[in-house]
Image (tube, rainbow, N blue to C red):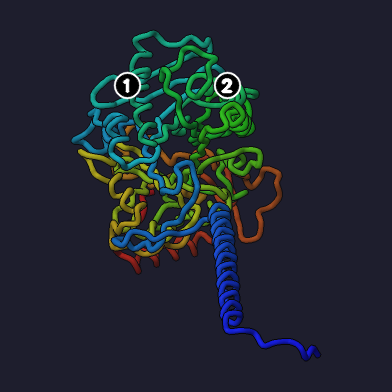
Amino acid sequence: MNTNSQAPSRDENQGAKRRLLVVTIAIFVLVAIAATATGILVVKKNNDAAANSSSANPTTSPGSKNGTNSTTPIYNGPWGNKKALIGYWGQNAIGNGYTPEFKGQLLTKNLTWQCDSGLYQQINLAFMPEFGSYPRFSLSLGGVDSSSGCYWYQGTDGVAPAADVQAPCIALAPQIKHCQSKNVKIVLSMAGDHLSDYYFHVGEGKLYAQLLFDKFLEGKGDPVRPFGDAVLDGIELDIEKNYQAGGASVEGAKNDWQPEMIELFIALKKLSPKVILGVVPQCYLNHWDYTDYNMGRLIASQNVKIDYVLIQYYNNPVCSYPFGFNFNDWKLKFKGPLIVGLPGDPSSAVYGGFLRPNDLQAVTDSIFSDAQFSGYSVYDVSSSNPPLSAYSQTLRDALDGKKVGNGSPAPGPIPRGAEIVGRCGNPTKPPLASIGPDTDADFFANAYTNCEAPSCGDGVGTCPKGWNCILCTSCDKAYWRSTSMEQDVANSTAYLKAHPEVTPPVG
């Protein structure tokens, strides 16, 4: 111990206190800076995680306070995060004769009007009803504002139509570009019914991919383009028959078309990676492999990038509301965006499927929050807009989460056993069939196809347990039928009795 040390003076004590205070403040500031930096990093990490999560999985956001739907699923289809309304344009369904006061009138409003309405996210040009025997194809877009329609035909020789025939089609180019400026996609729909002369020969999938690319997409290989310099956003296949179907032509019966459809879509995506590719099956799933009989393998193909599947829930009584609405079954067939296809008016689907507001509300309530439900389509825009109706606005309101009706009972039991009789047997004709076109052929859109299903004597073995044979009168052959049919009919009858407000589908 140093006995010679002296005690600190008053000035030295004050200096030490000041130094201690400065050091304390400095430490506090450093701690605060460190905490702030850590917080920023944590927030950023959390935000990044949330962003990654939302991009990988559908999320929900608040729906309209006016509606019954509490959440709006976000699903990244070709239309962004908004549920899409797709309108079919070009067939003037309002003038088909089933609404007598409009029979024969050309009342479809032009593309500019449709896209300026704000109702649609996509317009499908309907249709390219003929193709096969490359490079043959046709366009049939008619009945627009009492003006001449676009009727283009190119034969197997590849010669384009005369200039005066081309003119109405080329005149659509400014309207197509106007729609696209409004962020409305324009897609060409191929086929469209079960009567037109379309098919694919072996090897024509790739050939037609190049033709579509050069004539309707970004391709520059053909100077003669039906829509001039307009570049469409996508191609859709609405195939409603197959090479075995009774409606197929001699040329169309030569080979299976589905491998060519797969090649068509693969080649189109290679030529135009941004092209939208859609598939339009009937809602009916056949009994034997539970797929769409006309495009099931295309939909299931792992080699094809399909952007949406649009399921036709009209003219198909066995799978339309109130019975057999099979949206959940289709979710098992396709994991991407699903569009529910509806008619614009009862006259546009004489075999049923039109959803009046209460029924539309019931269907919407049952699927609205499903991440795969990406919207409705309407066939067509002539019958779903004035002067006949404002049904497109009703559909748009429902998709925006607004209440459009009081709701009806949830979809009833699926009459699976009765489907074969409904498809192969003699249908009950609707009251209006006698005044419509093609009375004998104007049956369900894919009625012929299921008469090619496995028959009882085709060598595939005996009927499985729970099935027996029934004579399919329109085919004059015996086909497998589920013995549960009687119970299905009983279930459907009981459902109607319990819900008298429900109108059963025609057929």
Quadrant in the picture for the N terminus: bottom right
> Which residue lies under the disc numbered 1?
149
Determine whether the residue tagged by mark 1 lies in a helix, strand or loop.
loop
Query: Which residue is found at the position 46% from the left and 62% from the top?
Result: 413
* Location of residue 496 in the rendering, given as x and y in whole percent from the top left corner: 36, 63
Query: Which residue is found at the position 22% from the left and 40% from the top?
Result: 388
The answer to whether 502 appears left or right of 261 in the picture is left
* Location of residue 88 in the rendering, given as x and y in whole percent from the top left corner: 37, 36
Residue 398 sits above or below residue 247 on the image: below
Visible residue check, residue 481: no
Q: Nearer the viewer, residue 154 or 464?
A: 154
- Mark 2 residue crowding within 10 angstroms, few (<14) / some (14–19) / many (20+): many
Q: Amino acid at mark 1?
A: Gly
Which comes before the other along the chain, label 2 or label 1? 1
- Mark 1 residue crowding within 10 angstroms, few (<14) / some (14–19) / many (20+): many
Residue 358 sits above or below residue 8 on the image: above
Report the residue that reaches farthest toward the right: 1
The answer to whether 186 appears left or right of 98 in the picture is right
Q: Nearer the viewer, residue 293 or 110?
A: 110
Q: Amino acid at mark 2?
A: Gln
Badge nearest the viewer, 2 or 1? 2
Q: Nearer the viewer, residue 470 or 398?
A: 398
| Disc ID at residue 279 | none
Residue 269 sits above or below residue 317 on the image: above
Q: Nearer the viewer, residue 56 or 214?
A: 56
The answer to whether 47 appears left or right of 185 in the picture is right
Visible residue check, residue 240: yes
Distance from disc 2 to disc 1, alpha carbons, whole Å, reads 26 Å
- In the rendered image, which quarter is residue 153 located in? top left
| Disc ID at residue 210 | 2
Determine whether the residue tagged by mark 2 lies in a helix, strand or loop.
helix
